[in-house]
Image (cartoon, helix red, strand yellow):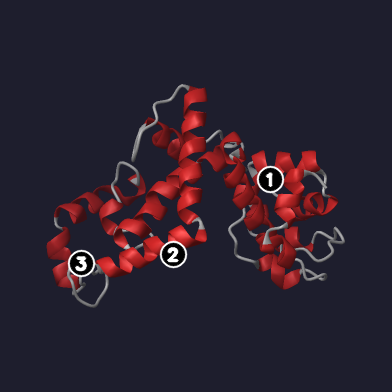
Amino acid sequence: MGKITDLLFKDIHVEDGLSACINCGTCTAICPAAGFYHYSPREIVDTVQSKNELKIIDLLKSEQIWYCGECMSCKTRCPRNNTPGMIIIALRSLSQELGYFTESEKGRQQLAVKRIIGEAILNKGYCVHIDQIETGLHPEQGPVWDWFKENVEQVHERLGTAYKKNTAGVMRNIAQEDLDELDKIFEVTGAHDRFRKIEEFSKQKARDLRIEFDKGIDEYFLHVYQSNCGKHY
């Protein structure tokens, strides 16, 4: 095997998810994503099982590995006990680790996931915090959401939530000691290092594309967040 294939097969997700694919296509037949995208779990597993270095590198650069919704329906149907969804996790992880994710439109969107969800977890203790949702980035929320944001405290008071309160309940403030513990978990598990790599590789890609790169909702963020080539169906 080549160097990259070796790295892929060291991932516990591949070890647990790949038994012996017989190329039957049952995973693709049951896959919800395959009904919407040009996407085949069968082809991906077959490629990984082949251990063809060049084809695996192509996978790491591809759009396909970002289409999976990780519902794990594939696991429930495979006659050989494979789990393509877990193999996808390993491919995504390696793509981020080596920077190949910037070679695909959906892959580049990992920066948006990191900055919206990843940083919300660390700073707020929530995957998505209500204060982050603005109609500029989420136009589907409509004018009602603008009214809600203008009257957020009164609305939450009427709903009986614990919004921004240091008490138990929905949307409460998360204690700093808990946020510190989350930060430590991210450091120990390597998540902080992965976040740094996503930023570094994204910055390099922004430079190649001659798009301004900074922090938060910068020009490159908006580019990857809003881009859609229309060829994903």
- The answer to which image quadrant residue 220 occupies is top left
The numbered dot on residue 163 is: 3
**Amino acid of disc 2:** Ile
Residue under pointer 2: 185
The numbered dot on residue 38 is: 1
In the image, is residue 188 above or below residue 196? below
Q: Is residue 227 visible?
A: no
Q: Callout 3 environment at 10 Å: few (<14), some (14 to 19), or many (20+)?
A: many
Q: Residue at x 62, y 57 (%)?
A: 89
Distance (Cα) linking label 1 and label 2: 36 Å
Mark count: 3
Label 1: state its secondary structure: loop
Q: Where in the figure is residue 202, as x and y percent of width and height?
A: 49, 36
Q: Are marks 2 and 3 in contact (CB under 8 Å)?
A: no
The numbered dot on residue 132 is: none
Q: Residue at x 66, y 51 (%)?
A: 91
**Amino acid of disc 1:** His
Q: Nearer the viewer, residue 130 or 51?
A: 51
Q: Are marks 1 and 2 in contact (CB under 8 Å)?
A: no
Q: Residue at x 32, y 51 (%)?
A: 141
- The answer to which image quadrant residue 218 occupies is top left
